Image: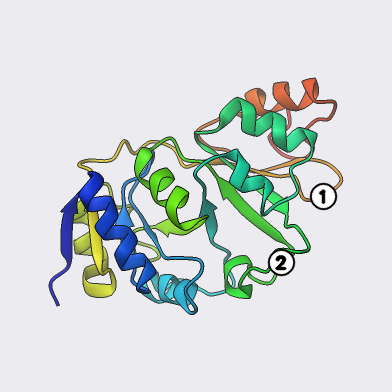
């Protein structure tokens, strides 16, 4: 099967939304590298992401969001979370939050944990699709262990017909992955250093009345 490539414009995004609603896997540009996404509302979609990447199923999938308001509908946005979101979204920050008890999410999305990873990317394509479909389960568009995909051609080379449509936004910016901060416990923890330094995270948290603990807290 030939992978369908479309331009990252209004028509291309509409085509991508249609493929997602039909249960397909779409590759799309983000503010770092290309990702692959499915519609959270489609049964079995998360499993298709894992299959496309040949990724172990115990690893959770991050949800890309249109805005911080979507985060509050899924995770518990306390004062530290709101402060970090206000400072760094859209951008390279993933927040691990306790999910709201009334929100049902697929076990395959979270790896069975009572938490969820959320990010508002600094790229209009995933935000536009999340605005239409809701939070978008997304992971990097490469098979596990292979280099990140930084162009539509890289996606096709890595994943082939495991992807139904590629939204071609040209070369990606690349750079560092998102910084990951876990706010699900009693104290914030820096799980992964990345695009936003621990020092900048710490400054916002201190102003919000708390601080990072563990590695990278200084």
Q: Which of pointers 1 and 2 lies earlier in the amino acid sequence? A: 2
**Quarter of the figure with residue 200:** top right
Viewer-closest of 163 and 65: 65
Give how far across and how far down residue 79 sits, in percent: 79, 33
Relative horizontal placement of residue 189, taking residue 149 as reference (left or right): right
Give how far across and how far down residue 77 sits, in percent: 74, 43
Q: Residue at x 39, y 51 (%)?
A: 129
Relative horizontal placement of residue 133, taking residue 74 as reference (left or right): left
Residues at marks 1 and 2, CA–CA distance in whole angstroms: 13 Å
Q: Which mark is residue 113?
A: 2
From the viewer's perspective, is residue 55 above or below residue 99? below
Q: Residue at x 65, y 57 (%)?
A: 116
Which element type, helix, strand or loop, lies under badge 1? loop
Q: Which mark is residue 185?
A: 1
From the viewer's perspective, is residue 104 above or below residue 123? below
The single residue placed furthest to the left in the displayed view is 2
Give how far across and how far down residue 100 sits, in percent: 75, 57
Q: Is residue 49 visible?
A: yes
């Amino acid at each position: 099967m030939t992978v369908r490539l479309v331009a990252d414009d209004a028509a291309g995004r509409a085509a991508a939304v249609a493929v997602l609603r039909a249960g397909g896997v779409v590759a799309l540009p983000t503010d770092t590298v290309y990702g692959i996404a499915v519609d959270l509302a489609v049964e079995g979609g998360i499993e298709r992401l894992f299959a496309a990447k040949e990724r172990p199923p115990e690893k959770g999938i991050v949800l890309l969001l249109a805005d911080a308001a979507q985060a509050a509908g899924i995770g518990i946005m306390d004062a530290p979370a709101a402060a970090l979101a206000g400072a760094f979204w859209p951008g390279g920050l993933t927040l691990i939050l306790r999910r709201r008890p009334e929100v049902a999410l697929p076990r395959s999305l979270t790896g069975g944990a009572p938490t969820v990873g959320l990010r508002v990317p600094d790229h209009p394509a995933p935000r536009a699709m999340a605005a239409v479909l809701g939070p978008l389960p997304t992971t990097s568009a490469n098979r596990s262990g292979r280099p990140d995909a930084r162009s539509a051609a890289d996606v096709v080379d890595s994943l082939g017909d495991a992807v139904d449509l590629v939204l071609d936004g040209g070369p990606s910016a690349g750079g560092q992955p998102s910084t990951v901060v876990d706010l699900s416990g009693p104290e914030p923890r820096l799980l992964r250093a990345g695009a936003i330094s621990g020092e900048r995270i710490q400054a916002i948290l201190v102003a919000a009345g708390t601080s990072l603990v563990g590695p990278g807290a200084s």
